[in-house]
Amino acid sequence: MFGLSKARGFSRNRSDASGATSGLGLRRTSRNLVSSSEGSHATSRLYVAFILLLLLFTPRVDSSWWYIGALGAGVICDNIPGLVNKQRQLCQRHPDIMQSIGRGAKEWIHECQHQFRHHRWNCSTLDRDHTVFGRVMLRSSREAAFVYAISSAGVVYAITRACSQGELKICSCDPHKRGRASDDRGNFDWGGCSDNVNYGIKFAKAFVDARERAVRDARALMNLHNNRCGRTAVKRFMKLECKCHGVSGSCVLRTCWQAMADFRTTGDYLREKYNGAVEVTMNQDGTGFAVADRELRRPIKNSLVYVEDSPDYCLRNKAAGSLGTSGRVCSKSSLGSDGCEVMCCGRGYDTTRVRRVTKCECKFKWCCAVECKDCEETVDVHTCKAPRHVNWLNHT
């Protein structure tokens, strides 16, 4: 654009010089060129102004530390988009922890997709996108609440596990689980390696919350609240594991340690919290929340919270980040969220008959193998129809 403006300016100056020494015809040509050039400059100025307005009023999806999971082993702090200063400092100070967070990111994203596999929004990620989930996270919805909670829980889980496995220099097993203790079965000795969940929570809070603490608005408060719910969910399911000592395992003496439950347990718990999430509004002084429905009297300390209603996710909508449900597999017989009536939003479904090969008639063969036959079966697969109505297509 600027190159063209310069070329036109040069033509205008040259024609002005020619007009000073030439006749009337050339002067008219010169005036026409000047008028054309000025019109082009005016058009360029309007174009630039239009682009600036777009940049000012188009919502921006910020990059996120979630993208660490896509970088794999090549985590370089200066190359991770979306980190605030404190996060970048922690990254540079603890590169080994960042490796653990990166591996953990793949795990919590997989868990998110498992929990919503039968939902219209199925926790889809976008390849080579620094925001990971796209514009759907712009809305302060239930889905955003769940993602922030499960991601925060995933960081705690990944760091705590890395501490126990001796992968990190700065932490190891829980140093406070020493000496004797007791439970409802009697006394026991602390031994083995208790998962150091408190360190995982401490680092996750410092790293994950840093971005939200830089801003004080309703969305930042919502994210901080749901981050905390995710962190405490991991600690909630810590379990005591013991090994018995004595004749024939008589448990005369017990050695015990604390261990995290499987991450699926945390995912199931947070999915239940998603189902019961509470809509909130920021209070007048901007320091906390109030329940939006005043008739709903319930504590929100351990609940996921959201500020905006979710879209229905029925149609592909780039502005909302919705991929729609066209082509999604559904269950013809189910009345739940995976049923064709709900999943397809009333648009109907297509049925395709496919052949599948599965293992069958398996037998144990001494020693030590299992032999199975390959059995072929024909099954019907139902997929949601694409929208046909003109008004629907206008949303995409």
Image: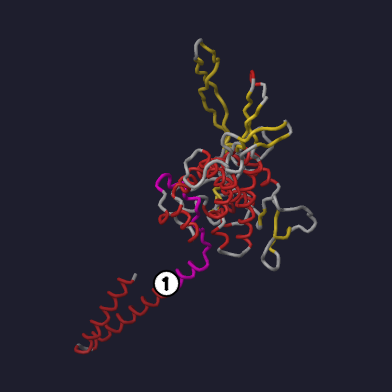
In this rendering, position of residue 137 left or right of residue 44: right
Residue 317 position in % (x across, y down): 55, 53
- Most extreme residue toward the front is 179
Q: Is residue 225 magenta?
A: no
Task: Please give the range of residues in magenta.
Answer: 47-74
Query: Where on the picture, by quarter, is residue 8?
Result: bottom left
Q: What number of labels is visible?
A: 1
In this rendering, position of residue 193 left or right of residue 337: left
Task: Compare residues 168 and 378 and report the one nearer the observer.
Answer: 168
User: Principal SS element in the magenta part?
Assistant: helix
- Most extreme residue toward the top is 366
Query: Where on the picture, by quarter, is residue 343?
Result: top right
Coloured how? secondary structure
> What amino acid type should be assigned to the residue bearing mark 1?
Val
The quadrant the N terminus occupies is bottom left
Residue 233 position in % (x across, y down): 64, 45
Q: Residue at x 52, y 50 (%)?
A: 133
Task: Compare residues 256 and 263 and report the one nearer the observer.
Answer: 256
User: Disc 1 designates what residue?
Assistant: 48
Task: Compare residues 108 and 332 and report the one nearer the observer.
Answer: 108
Residue 336 position in % (x across, y down): 68, 38
